Structure formats: C-alpha cells, structure tokens
Image (cartoon, rainbow, N blue to C red):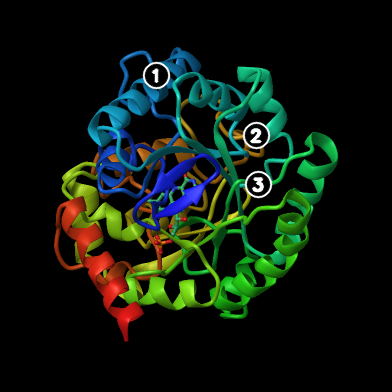
Amino acid sequence: MLKIGGRQMTVPIIQGGMGIGVSLGGLAGAVAACGGMGVISSANTGYAEPDFWQNHAEANRRTLRAEILRARQIAAGNGLVGVNIMVATRQYPEAVKTAVAAGADAIICGAGLPSDLPGLVSAASGEAEILLAPIVSGGKAARTICRLWDRRYNVTPDFVVIEGAEAGGHLGFKRDELLNGTALPLMEILVEVKTELAEYEQKYGREIPVFVAGGVYSGRDVAGYMQAGAAGAQIATRFIATEECDAADGYKQAMLAAKAEDVRIVQSPVGMPGRALNSPLFKRLDAEGRIKPESCVNCIVPCRPAETPYCISRALIAAVQGDWENGLFFCGSNVGRLNKIVSVAELMAEIMDELVAENEV
Ligand SMILES: Cc1cc2nc3c(=O)[nH]c(=O)nc-3n(C[C@H](O)[C@H](O)[C@H](O)COP(=O)(O)O)c2cc1C
C-alpha cells in the first residue's frame, strides 16, 4: 500500500499520460481499477468532437471532464485517476481548473516547470484536495520547483515523477545528449533528485514519493529502482499495447511492428526534442523540410505557426486515429520489446508478479 497525501494506491505503478488521445478515460480507468494511478492526457482531448477545429477550447473542456468521469466510473473506487497537463499548452490553466472541478485525484505537469500550479489549483477550488506533481529530468529542476512552491505557496510537491532519457514523447534533455547517449542514467538522476528533495521532506515532515519513468519495462526494473529509493515507476509505452488503450488499433499495431532501429529523436514545435517512430511523416519532412499547417488552434505556447516545420496536433491526431502515413507516433525506447496486445489487468499482474518475486529474492 502506497500512501500519498490522504490517498492510496495498492500498486506502485503510474500509467504515464499520453497525448493526444492515447490515454483517456478508458485506459486510465482500467489502470486505476487495478490499484495503480491511471493518467489522462489533457492534450486536445476534444480532437474527435465535430466542433474541435472551430471551438477547440470548449471541446477540450467538455471532453476532459467527461473522460475524468469515465475513468472514475471504470475504476469503481479503486486506485487513483490523474490528469497529465503540459505546461507548454495554452490551455494549461484551463485544464487545471477542469481537472480540479471534475474531481481528479492528481495533476502531473510536464513539458515545462509548473511554477504556478499550486496557485492555479487554489484559485480553482479554494482549498485544494488534489495531489500535485511536477515531472523533472534532473536534480536542478526538482530543486527549482520545490524552492518556488515553498517560497510562493508554502507547499511542497505531493510526489515527483522523474522522466529519464529513454522515455517517449517530449524529453527534457538536449538533442545532442539524446543522440550521443550522454544524458545521465535514470538511476543517477534518481539519486540526484532524492538528495534535492531531502531538505523539503524534512521541512514539511513527510516523504515526497518519487516515481521513475523512461524505459522502465518489467517488475524487475521497478524493483531495482525501488531498492534505490523510488516509490514506484511511471510506465507509458507498454500501456499502448493494451486492449483498453484509447488509441486506434493502427497505433497499437505500429507499436507491435516497431523494432529498436525504427525509433528516432525528432524535433517538436513544442520546442523540445521527442522520441517517436521514424514514420513516413519524418521521411517527408527530411525530404521537404516543412509541411505547412492547414489550420491552427493555437494550442502550444512556443509554437510559431508561420515557421513550424509541421503541426504537431494534426500529426498526433492522425496517429491516434491510426493514420500511418501522416501520424506522429510517440514511443519510448523500449517499444521494440512489445510483442502482443494484452489487457491492462494482465499487464499489471505480470509487472506485479515480477516485482514481488524480485523482492523475495
Ligand atoms: C505516445 C506517448 C505520448 C506521450 N504524451 C505525453 C504527454 O502528453 N505529456 C507528458 O508529460 N508525457 C507524455 N509522454 C511521456 C509518458 O507519460 C512517460 O513518462 C514516458 O513515456 C515513460 O517512458 P516509457 O514510455 O518508456 O514507459 C508520452 C509518451 C508516449 C509514449
């Protein structure tokens, strides 16, 4: 049993938020039903709504709320339901408000440091009863966020997710570090972050559980990180190959067909490098330099539509709908190990059996 704030998980696994539309209420609810934390990505949740391109803020608000309620219903009182919100999205403050109002258990923020998150939450709810966590990629970011939250709001993170260099989606490392393999290993970042958190654990008189992410595959991996002081792991790519994952079957099949050498580091309009499959979209971008956006919903703060090499929302929406030719298929570095689609319950049981066996050795 893992207690975080006033809440608890029976399984120390967070399913990483995956946008656009890869982790919605279906996947998150199934993970929570097994006692873990299922996480909905708030990124353009309304992508399939008929009014999305005309009225995208409202479509996202409506669907994010509906997906949180759907996850809760599937979870049937088990586990936790979180929302992953990218700081770099223009709807970040709005999504925080929606997550609080719909009764999510946790907000996990990545793609930027959520320096104002506690303020946004208390403005939304008066007294916040929701777990707050930043995603960091090193000790320095952990220190910065703890210091800011402590000084400005007199709070400390309820838990922290460390995302290492093997993760899928946007990565908090320099492109060169990713290409030449010089990014610090996850185990070393864990030690760094734990050291930075110690001061705040002491000040606030409680532990700040840390979850490691990026290339964590088996229960044995999870056990290794837990022995080094992690409370558990955040896993994403493995959850794409599940029956309950909210992406179209074409996304899942692309993951199953991928080999390690099909993965590449891509540049994203979010202004960070990312890890994805080397799909036809990138071959076209290599050849043509740019695919001019057809329309824009102004979703990413740092994106410049007039210059962006491609529209990331269109590319991610194509992917979640299974469109191999036009999609951007984010994945972690271990995608080549996926070989079948299983249910979330089977995957969670496999990881937990390995974890328990490893702890008994
Ligand atoms: C398809 C996909 C989409 C993702 N989207 C997001 C996202 O919207 N926000 C975020 O913070 N992280 C995102 N991530 C990162 C995951 O939440 C997770 O931390 C990471 O992929 C863990 O590594 P693993 O995939 O090797 O398990 C995404 C990852 C994948 C594979």
Q: Residues within 10 Å of mark 1 (few under 14, many from 20)?
A: some
Q: Look at 37% across and 56% down and name the residue there.
A: 236
The residue closer to the viewer here, 176 or 325, is 176
The image quarter containing residue 341 is: bottom left
Q: Is residue 221 left or right of residue 74?
A: right
Residue 208: x %, y % from top left: 62, 55
| Label 3 CB sits under 8 Å from any ligand 1 atom | no
Up-down: is 265 above or below 296?
A: below
In this figure, which residue is indicated by the disc labeled 3?
157
Quadrant occupied by the C terminus:
bottom left
Secondary structure beneath dot 1 equals loop
Q: Look at 62% across and 19% down and name the residue there.
A: 124
In this figure, which residue is indicated by the disc labeled 2?
301
The kind of residue tagged 1 is Phe
Residues at marks 2 and 1, CA–CA distance in whole angstroms: 18 Å
In this figure, which residue is indicated by the disc labeled 1?
52
Mark closer to the chain start, 3 or 2: 3
Q: Look at 56% across and 21% down and name the residue there.
A: 97
Residue 188: x %, y % from top left: 61, 78
Quadrant occupied by the N terminus:
bottom left
The image quarter containing residue 102 is: top left
Is residue 296 something that shows in the picture? no
Up-down: is 228 above or below 133?
A: below
Secondary structure beneath dot 3 equals loop
